[in-house]
Image: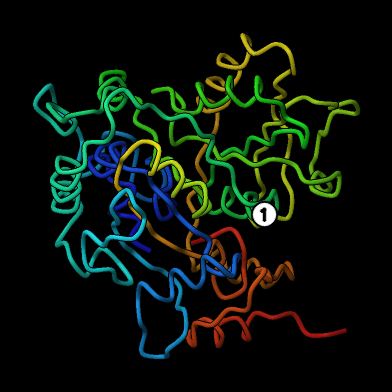
Amino acid sequence: MGGPGGPPGGFDGPPGAGRGATKGPGGPGANRPNRPAPDDEVKAGKTGGIQWFSTWQSAKAEAARTGRPILLVSAAPHCAGIPGIW
Amino acid sequence: MDRSFLSDQAVVIASRQFVCARLATYEDSEESKLLKALVPTRSGELENSVFAILAPDGVTRLVRPGRSMRMGYRDAQAFAKALDGIAAKYPGKPGETAKALPLAASVPVALTVAAADSLPLVILPKDADKAMLDALIKLAWSPELVGRLQYARAGDTKDLKGLKALPAEAGNDILVVTPDDFAQGGEVTATLKAGQPDSWDGILRTVVTRHTVQVKSMRNHLPEGKRKGVFYEPANPVTDPQEIQARERNRPAKP
């Protein structure tokens, strides 16, 4: 389903098929600072999903260590009491 | 919730400049306090789904927090552009690369999250040492594997109950599990042998290549879950008024 930050390939279609699909060197991911890994991913056509930290403690520690800002969301991996869906 | 935003490739790419935290809403009391303080709600209680962007100090708000990024951005492209703008102001410390494994709080929570994401779950042994963690961290953030796996550390043997194809002598090996649809268990599909880290990359790449993302819909998943009698109790009480009502409709009758 993709979920909140789940991998492309489910609800939102395969990697590269979404609205943000990279169409070449000038596509998303080009010329952005401090981000060698994503460019490698794009070149390989292998962009996964967002890699989430699952606890606030670990995310906060990593942000302090790296100096990177924090994208924070919360969600319940259960809906109406039924597990396994966002 | 926001799946068309957060699964968008431009957003995923932009996210690599951030530390991304997705907290399970009702699993940790301290996290609940944080989330509740970020987004006041009409009910006065913590409601499911919170969105915020914070500075590296974890306190300073860089955008107005809300229930969803949809409230502030017209589409995923606009959101990705905003993320790039923020990242330009907070580029991070030079040369710092990921040195942490994004472990879930527990195997049961990780299994539920992995099922919801339809991702394989990597379960480290309880006694995973630094060498094992370091080797896995390097792989977890590699271009081929980043964002394609969930991670958790086993707490006790109870955590592994319900897993099919569990090796008789898993010992200190790492298990890769495909969760079942309702996170009631899963199947061990690969094992990373302790002491053989050179083999892990190839095994994990094979796992993610062969893994099929299950497309779930509320329309099918909820009635099927009710029919099977599965019901999830998070560690903390659900406080979202709408969700409380919805849960009661699916709560199995007491025998």
Question: Quadrant location of residue B5?
Answer: bottom left
Measured from the top left, where is residue B199 in percent x and y?
63, 11
Please give left or right for residue A67 compared with residue B193 in the image: left
Q: Is residue B100 left or right of residue B92?
A: right
Where does residue B116 sit, x and y in percent of width and height?
54, 54
The image shows residue A63, relative to residue B99, as above or below, that is below
Q: Secondary structure at mark 1?
A: loop
| Residue toward you, B235 or B131 | B131
Q: How is the image coloured?
A: rainbow
Which quadrant holds residue A17?
top left
* Above or below, B162 relative to B40: above
What residue lies at 52% left-to-right and 20% top-to-bottom?
B205
Q: Residue at x 21, y 42 (%)?
A: B90
The picture places residue B217, in percent across and down from the top left corner, at 47, 61
**What residue is pinned by disc 1?**
B183
Instruction: Name the image quarter holding the N terminus of chain B.
Output: bottom left
Q: Looking at the picture, which amino acid does disc 1 mark?
A: Ala
Residue appearing at x 43%, y 22% in the figure: B142
Seen at 59% across and 65% down, the residue is B28
Q: Residue furthest bottom?
A: B43
Q: Position of residue B130 (x, y in %)?
A: 65, 25
Q: Residue furthest left?
A: A26
